[in-house]
Amino acid sequence: MRNFLYIVKYTVVDIINQKSFFVLLAVSIGFLLLLRGCYSGNYVVNGKSLDSVTVAWHASIIAFHIVAGGVLLIAAILSMNLLSRDRDDGTVQYMLSKPLARITYVAGRAVGIWLVSFAFMFVLHLTIFVITLISAGGAMPGYLAASCLCSVNVLFMVLLVCTMSLFMPDFAAAMVGIGVVAVSFVADSLFHAAQSRLGQALLANHPAGIPGWEMVWPKVCSMQYCAVSLIKGDVFRPLGSVHPVLVMAGYVCLAAAGLAFAFQRKEI
Amino acid sequence: MFSTIFGSCARIWVNIVYLYLAMVTFSSISKRYQSGTGPAVDNISFSVAEGEFFALLGPNGAGKTTLVKMLLDFVRPTAGTAAINGMASTNPLARRGVGYLAENARVPLHLSGRGYLSRQAELCGMSGARAGEKISEVLETVGMAGKEKSRMKTYSKGMLQRICLAAAMIPGTSLLVLDEPASGLDPLGIRDVRRIMDGLKQKGVTIILNSHMLSEVEKTCDTAAIINKGKIVLKDAIASIVREGESLEDVFVRAIEGPHA
């Protein structure tokens, strides 16, 4: 356990020692601060003017989705060359020549990347939360809890890309991870659009069933909708009969088992 | 008949005692890479006794590094087993007290020398003052004291080799596996490495040295095994394989190319 924590620490320290990490974080926060401009505008929809709290509410939820999706991209980029870089700079050899199980090493590396990515996402969501609180005067209970829920998606992305990087070039591994998430966004968004009143009206004469593959595909986007339901206080309607939290927990376990199994057999 | 039975029993006992004393044991170990044409290591069995200074010699691609990697569980054998102190090499605890110097001194260049050694010490269960003392001791031994605070990307090849040697000595070492320790070093550096290895030998550390520098091996090692095409072609005490008037290089060439070379 102690060695696992050491490896997590080394992973986190190595990433946050890179200036580019803080530059990216600062630029992201800077963009989020531009949101403040949205709250002071006068918006009119269907002849009714919207109050700033309503605007802030919708802007914050859109920003929540963008941040949660963007961090998945960052997690993929951080994970893609994690194991190959360790192989190239001899880190894996120096670590595994110590009394350290392979699973401890790879789990420590993956958890380290996940922690950094999650912290990055949480800071950005916290920024939105604070901006909304200050600019619109309305706290959004559940916003930070929703951010924590989305960390399951980040963990899935890290484990998936790390596993794939053992079988294919780094860039291809990142593309596979991003591709899985992109398909989930399209499929789940179409489902949730179909659940809306407009969608129901359009599909009234053409009731569409849910394809089988959509039922078993990683529910990354549904997870975000589920997280947003925490903010809105809505009842979440999942795609299919299994809740996306359970689906994603299953996929995280599957990806973790795949990574452990593949790395155990990997020649160093 | 009695003498045959007595002889067999004696041999069995000698083998048992030798295995008990052995620090490293390879038993019928083989490795065939999927991409390779033939076996990298082909049914090799031998032991290295505690405190022995053992050299693995052979031409490039003979299987020396594969053998070392199987010992450290970096590569899984196709058949057979490797053990350290009687413990299967697949068990991480077998690597307790084992120091390893990899070929070509690859290190994470963004770390300082001390930072790198601190990580090594932490992973070996050392921390605080004990780790600090150990790091200072090994830095002194390899002649890197005072240079450890710079980032390793500013180090020369020789300095990197020395810091890697220091890292290999961190575990407090009962077994040291050195893959080309003199690679990249100037003649003074090679002399220093020889002195360090002599010092470790005096302390009773078991050393497995994988090297092409036959003159150094001849000066320092007790036993040598010459490997060619994955098989051991010669293994014995250096004093008994090098005859009067010849060098280890002559023995090596004869073992690899045959008696008519």
Image (cartoon, coloured by chain):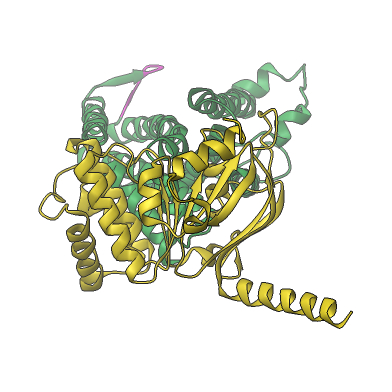
Chain colours: A green, B yellow
Residue A186 quadrant: top right
Query: In this rendering, does residue A268 appear at all?
Result: no
Figure check: B26 above or below B181: below
Vertical placement of A42 versus B38: above or below?
A: above
Which residue is the extreme one toward the front?
B245
Tell me, yes or no, whether the highlighted magenta stretch contains residue B167.
Answer: no
Residue at 62% x, 58% y: name it: B46
In the rendering, at what x and y percent does residue B250 appear?
Answer: 48, 39
Counting from the top left corner in percent of width and height, residue B176 is at 41, 59
On the rendered structure, is A53 left or right of B235?
Answer: left
Q: Is residue B149 left or right of residue B162?
A: left
Q: Quadrant of residue B102?
A: top left
Residue A261 in the figure: left or right of residue A230 = right
Give percent across and percent down for residue A35. Answer: 26, 28
Q: Nearer the viewer, residue A111 or B236?
A: B236
Q: Nearer the viewer, residue B129 or A122?
A: B129
Q: Main secondary structure of the magenta part?
A: strand
Q: Please tell me which residue is depicted at 34% across the width and 45% down the height of the picture.
A: A122
Quarter of the rendering containing residue B258: top right
| Furthest residue in direction left, as rendered | B146
In percent of the image, x 63 and y 45: which residue is there? B233
* Nearer the observer, B189 or A102: B189
Residue A153's spot in the image, x, y percent? 51, 41
- Is residue A199 visible in the rendered structure shown here? yes
Query: Which residues are the magenta region?
Result: A45-50
> Between residues B147 and A209, which one lies in front from this camera angle?
B147
Q: Which residue is painted at 54% across and 30% down in the image?
A: A177
Residue A46 part of the magenta-drawn span: yes
